Image (cartoon, rainbow, N blue to C red):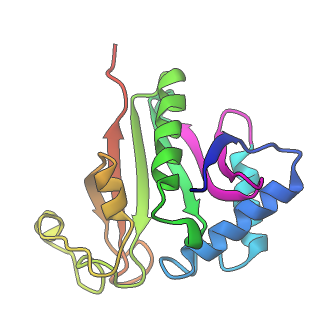
């Protein structure tokens, strides 16, 4: 059985940075192909996660290859942290790498005094019942009846303890919403 470890993404390791960017392109190809269509566009995103005050972590397999990547940044004076992005190499999905990256991220956020994590998970490819329909005026009614049609990531986050806190209808064009999810990771003082 292949194992992996989680570590900071070294800002000086161009190879690891390029691997993380490639994983983003591959992992989002079928979920949100417009997000990072090229390695160059993904490289820009990875480099942003390396800025001061942010979190940038990778899962590394026994051979030293990057197999997963998570980044995030604080908001609301550090009380809330956004996961952006999370990507696992497609041939490694379903092996606990994404779960381990999110769990590690949660711990780092707690250590930094964060209370809540949030993530936006777009549905641009008609993967849920929230896509391809007019969500107005009864947005919450649609959310209450959400179904996963084709392995949309919202279900992964739900299994990790996140709940849907809202939807931005038409965020990516007509009928293409962004599903917002959040999770408390520590209690306020």
Q: Does residue 37 sit above or below 155 in this rendering?
A: below
- In the rendered image, residue 21, in percent from the top left (x then y), is placed at 72, 65
Which residue is depicted at the point 50% across and 66% down? 93
Q: Nearer the viewer, residue 160 or 118?
A: 160
In the rendered structure, the answer to whether residue 11 lies left or right of residue 83 reads right
Q: Which residues are magenta?
A: 51-74
Q: Does residue 12 sit above or below 148 in this rendering?
A: above
Which residue is depicted at the point 65% across and 38% down? 54
> What is the number of callouts on the image?
0
In the rendered structure, the answer to whether residue 183 lies left or right of residue 33 reads left
- In the rendered image, residue 188, in percent from the top left (x then y), is placed at 33, 19
Q: Answer with the quarter of the image where residue 133 lies.
A: bottom left
Q: Nearer the viewer, residue 180 or 154?
A: 154
Q: Answer with the quarter of the image where residue 144 lies.
A: bottom left
Asked whether the viewer can see residue 109, the reply is yes
- In the rendered image, residue 17, in percent from the top left (x then y), is placed at 79, 56
Secondary structure character of the magenta stretch overall:
strand
Residue 170 among those drawn in magenta? no
Q: Does residue 52 sit above or below 82 in this rendering?
A: above
In the rendered structure, the answer to whether residue 179 lies left or right of residue 142 reads right
Q: Nearer the viewer, residue 135 or 70?
A: 70
Asked whether the viewer can see residue 56, the reply is no
Which residue is depicted at the point 56% across and 66% down? 92
């Amino acid at each position: 059985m292949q194992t992996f470890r989680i570590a900071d993404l070294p800002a000086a390791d161009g190879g690891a940075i390029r691997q993380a960017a490639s994983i983003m392109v591959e992992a989002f190809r079928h979920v949100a192909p417009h997000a990072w269509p090229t390695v160059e566009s993904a490289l820009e995103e990875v480099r942003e996660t390396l800025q001061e005050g942010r979190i940038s972590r990778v899962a590394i397999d026994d051979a030293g290859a990057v197999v997963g990547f998570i980044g995030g940044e604080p908001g609301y004076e550090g009380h809330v942290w956004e996961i952006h992005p999370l990507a696992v190499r497609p041939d490694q999905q379903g092996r606990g790498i994404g779960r381990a990256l999110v769990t590690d991220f949660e711990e780092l956020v707690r250590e930094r005094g964060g209370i809540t994590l949030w993530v936006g998970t777009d549905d641009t490819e008609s993967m849920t019942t929230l896509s391809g329909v007019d969500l107005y005026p009864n947005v919450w009614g649609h959310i209450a009846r959400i179904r996963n049609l084709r392995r949309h990531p919202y279900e992964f986050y739900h299994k990790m303890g996140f709940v849907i806190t809202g939807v931005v209808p038409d965020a990516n064009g007509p009928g293409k919403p962004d599903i917002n999810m959040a999770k408390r990771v520590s209690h306020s003082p």
